[in-house]
Image (cartoon, helix red, strand yellow):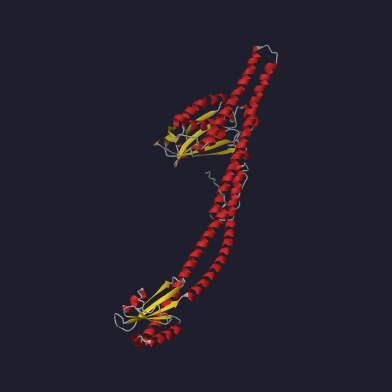
Amino acid sequence: MKWFHFKIRLGIRPKLAGTYLLIIVGVLLGINWLVLGALEADYLRDREVKSLTNANIIALAGQDVILRQDRNTYYFARNYGEQVRSRVIILDGSGKVTVDSFGESWLEGQSLSHAEVVSALAGTGRAGVYTLQSSGEKVLYAAVPVGDQKPASGAVMLVTGLSDVYIALGEIRRLMMLVSTGGGLIAVAVGLFLAARFTRPIQNLTGAVQAMAQGQLGQRVKIDSSDELGRLAESFNEMAGKLEKEDRIRRQFLTDSSHELKTPLSSIKVLAQSLLDGKEQDIEVYRDFLQDVNTEADRMSRLVNDMFQLAKLEDAEYPVQFSAQELEPVLDHVQGLLRGQADLKGIIMEIRPAQGAGGRTAVADVISWPLNRDLFTRVLINLLDNALRYTSTGGKVLVSYQVERDELVLRVSDTGRGIPQEYLPHIFERFFRVDQARARETGGTGLGLAIARQAVLRHGGTITVDSRQGVGTTFELRFPGTPVRVHS
């Protein structure tokens, strides 16, 4: 046999409405059942008390007549039965029927063993509800003893029909069902309304997410609530903003990188084409052309390396290891790498602890600090290289360092031409150059400060800049942590 499986996809709205309906129906059915049960028990209790009272009155009023068990006993039972609208049955001390107010001869002489009869003959009145097998009608048996003797010398039993009770209960049941149905329909309508109201924000969020999945990153959701949905919308909008920003940065990066790579490639293409088309025989001319090609290739290689380095640093999953590094040897190594460039331009380059008031060292000399040596070195080289590029002959570049509370603070200062104030907010952006023409002349890729900033961020630190034109520029770096060992 081949089985077919059908999967029904329901939205949140019908699910919520269906849940409301099931809950309401269950609650109404439970309430109806409890109320009807309580009413039935109350009606039957009232009828039991009334029947036992009538049976006691009959037993007390006709005690002498009942015990004689003659024809007068029958008339007595019949008259009282008509008054209380019940069948009156008289029994002797053994439980045998002696008189039936209905006058049915088949019952007379029969022994009854009902619990009510046994209890009455034992001296205690009792009542119980039974269902007649012949008609299915419910009746109430109420039996009481005759006289004060125990065991009793006889008993009076009333058989009372309960059709009026169950007719009344049926009317009440129909009324309750009508009210419950109306209430249920109203509740369903309210549930649908509330479900639509509650799910509308979710539908908005779903639509926005689907649009974002198709590349429309400018989606925002407006939800005027402070509940969980409101907080979810805020988180979504914040995420959408970050994604849009990252996508914009990515697109800009691709555009900028393509433009930056295009320049050396175009130069190489022009030089190569010139060599192919030219008829120059002098080997030195070819050497000059090839030297230019090599220079452009080196420039493109630096650019690609910087782009790769920046991409790695921006990847949160790219591992960065930190270990205790002796600060002064690292600074001496950086100074040694750039000493030749500084001497060539006639620039004084100095690396020393920060000076406090009176010319004394502001803090103890830091011996070691938790750093990534390669990234830390790259940051200093990038900043010092920029400082040396844009500082004129006879100028000065200074690197000072100190510990402030739980931070290692370094300041790279120069006496260069400075940066215009309107450019300061953008200097850490990829490929941003204050002077495009001069930057390319000096061989910069436009990624040095972006790499420095990202490397500092991977340390959990900060980098800021302060610059005044004609005075100079100062970069301040702060690395959080705890010195491993400090000497005073």
Left or right: residue 192 compared with residue 47: right
- Return the x and y of residue 255 as percentages of the image width and height: 64, 34
Residue 133 falls in image quadrant: bottom left
Q: Nearer the viewer, residue 103 or 21?
A: 103
Q: Is residue 103 visible?
A: yes
Q: Nearer the viewer, residue 11 or 213?
A: 11
Q: Nearer the viewer, residue 6 or 331?
A: 6
Q: Is residue 434 visible?
A: no
Exactly how many numbered labels are in the figure? 0
- Return the x and y of residue 4 as percentages of the image width and height: 55, 45
Residue sitting at the far front: 106
Q: Is residue 134 above or below residue 357?
A: below
Q: Is residue 302 above or below residue 279?
A: below
Residue 486 falls in image quadrant: top left
Left or right: residue 148 compared with residue 10: left
Q: Nearer the viewer, residue 378 or 320?
A: 320
Residue sitting at the far left: 150
- Return the x and y of residue 417 as percentages of the image width and height: 61, 33
